[in-house]
Image (cartoon, rainbow, N blue to C red):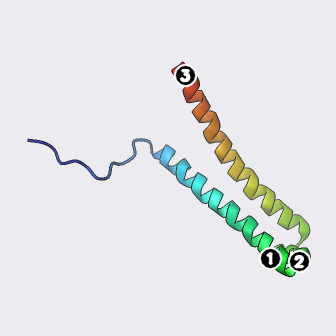
Amino acid sequence: MMKPQAHYKKPKNNKKALFATLRIVLTAAAVALFGIIGYYAATQGWEAVFAWFGGKYACMVVMILVAAITAGVWLWKLVRTMQRFKEDD
């Protein structure tokens, strides 16, 4: 007797699924944040953006942190993929 084919398989590596989800969420958050800031700066001016974040340095720190964390997660994925290809050789 044949086993019924599973329509959903649990991921074998939960850490891999977690980081994939984290990459997607951080990328979407970064794009949304920069889009909101860009729109707000275009319609209200940069001074309104700085006031929104509580100061120009707070705005800069938030933007740099979101961009750095997002880039770091994608870079980590790239390094892991390159290591996997190197191991296959």
Alpha-carbon distance for marks 3 and 1?
Answer: 47 Å
The reply to whether residue 52 is in sight is no
The reply to whether residue 10 is in sight is yes
Tell me what residue is drawn at x 66 percent, y 63 percent: 29
Q: Judge left or right: residue 86 versus residue 2.
A: right
**Residue type for callout 2:** Gly
**Residue type for callout 3:** Glu
Tell me what residue is drawn at x 65 percent, y 45 percent: 74
Q: Tell me how many marks there are.
A: 3
Give the residue number, with chain letter if any, for mark 2. 45
Q: Earlier in the sequence, mark 1 or mark 2?
A: 1
**Residue type for callout 1:** Tyr
Q: Quadrant of the C terminus?
A: top right
Give the residue number, with chain letter if any, for mark 3. 87
Q: Position of residue 19 (x, y in %)?
A: 55, 48
Picture disc at residue 51: none
Q: Earlier in the sequence, mark 3 or mark 1?
A: 1
Picture disc at residue 40: 1
**Depth order, front residue of 34/61:** 34
Q: Earlier in the sequence, mark 3 or mark 2?
A: 2
State which mark lies toward you, 3 or 2. 2
